[in-house]
Amino acid sequence: MATAIPQRQLFVAGEWRAPALGRRLPVVNPATESPIGEIPAGTAEDVDAAVAAAREALKRNRGRDWARAPGAVRAKYLRAIAAKIIERKSELARLETLDCGKPLDEAAWDMDDVAGCFEYFADLAESLDKRQNAPVSLPMENFKCYLRKEPIGVVGLITPWNYPLLMATWKVAPALAAGCTAVLKPSELASVTCLELADVCKEVGLPSGVLNIVTGLGSEAGAPLSSHPGVDKVAFTGSYETGKKIMASAAPMVKPVSLELGGKSPIVVFDDVDVEKAVEWTLFGCFWTNGQICSATSRLILHKKIAKEFQERMVAWAKNIKVSDPLEEGCRLGPVVSEGQYEKIKQFVSTAKSQGATILTGGVRPKHLEKGFYIEPTIITDVDTSMQIWREEVFGPVLCVKEFSTEEEAIELANDTHYGLAGAVLSGDRERCQRFTEEIDAGIIWVNCSQPCFCQAPWGGNKRSGFGRELGEGGIDNYLSVKQVTEYASDEPWGWYKSPSKL
């Protein structure tokens, strides 16, 4: 068929490999609900092979080929991958859209970010050479000390479906830059472009086993990877519930993990804003990526003085958002990723209504789209802080609204969550904005905007949103361990013990 996806196998030790059990999973286009191909369904046996290949690549030639090679060697491959991503940008963006439903313009933007991320960590791989053997000042002159940064080893990378290739890149690029070898397990709901990354790696000649990709169900491939004794660290982006399971599976081996989990982030809007600009940022902060983004500012905390006008303008703007097939020009909201996610979102809206909230707009299938997992951009008011819609992550285009009168009340509402990934404040008062950046308990704060993300700036959250930071200069440190080397530099004997008499 014209829209068929490439039919790939698992990627292990630099080669395509059929899954051990020979099973494959269907890939469904969320815009049409039609099958468009299959991906391989890896299991524990395939994970074993991938981990073994990664371990062999890590130790090959006593590490000189990859782990202990100069950072400039690894940077060459990362830059080659970036160049290939740009070369294949249109194809990859289209595949991303077919697989997960995000608007084509967003998918194309993602591909630029993927290439930029590989380039950024290529630079950090080179700069890592300059950071090696950093001296440590000691109080005793007869000792010298320096520090080495060394790859943590074989890493398991488990990634989500909302930014399939970009979220994989956030982990793959720094892990490889650090000198680690990796096994990537993407979400079974959106694996297509991650398998294309494998094809890119073959094209650029990435040494075999440095990156291995095993697709499949979380219970059959993800769980064996996170608990595998041959994996030295697990990095995961996904739900809070799955994050807990990964922590538990790593605990018996005291294996380090880094977790980027869910969110229920606030956006606080004061009465001194430009209403039109603030409305657009508020909707973008929740409806970008079809509302399926962990950092979505999905709790609007709105000043009472402008509440009526602001809500009226939000409805007008929301009704003007183009909801369509994501391949259609100008699409700004496509389908959610799967039927399961679609039904879950509808249940959230139904529960909110039954608990007394008001559906101001949306919450239903668009009338002009009979097929596909579409839901109109949804705004819910008359929300109580005890309601499910206020407390739980929806992961869809659903914004709930709560009004406030004072700064103190706004801060209390902003922090009224188990999560702590992000937050935003919109106000013309710079000092007020500064207070909110300090008082909102989250890892990322936006001022007069929502959702900008740059690979140069660290990303991660607090509380149930996980721990550890990706991206930024510290992103590579997620995959490095620090080795202290101390040398006795004196010609004199240590002299602690009395020397025995010589015969």
Image: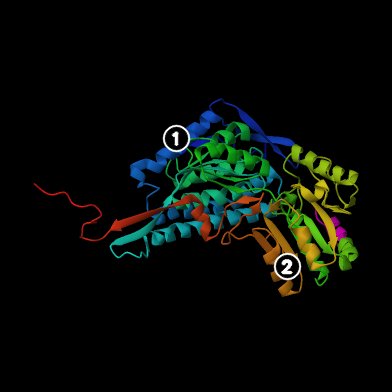
Identify the amino acid type marked 1: Ala
Q: Is residue 265 left or right of residue 69?
A: right
Q: Is residue 365 visible?
A: no
Q: Quadrant of residue 117?
A: bottom right
- Tell me which segment is drawn in magenta: 314-323
Q: Is residue 255 visible?
A: yes
Which residue: 88% across, 53% down? Answer: 361
Q: Quadrant of residue 297?
A: bottom right
Spot occupied by residue 354 in the image (x, y as percentages of width and height): 90, 43
Spot occupied by residue 62 in the image (x, y as percentages of width and height): 34, 43
Instruction: Kindly identify which numbered label has been placed on residue 52.
Output: 1
Spot occupied by residue 351 in the image (x, y as percentages of width and height): 86, 43
The residue tagged 2 is 448
Q: Residues within 10 Å of mark 1 (few under 14, many from 20)?
A: some
The answer to whether 433 is drawn above or below residue 154 in the figure is below
Disc 2 from disc 1: Cα separation: 48 Å
The answer to whether 246 is drawn above or below residue 414 in the figure is above
Q: Main secondary structure of the magenta part?
A: helix
Identify the amino acid type marked 2: Asn
What is the tally of numbered marks visible in this picture? Answer: 2
Which SS class for mark 2? loop
Which residue: 33% across, 43% down? Answer: 61
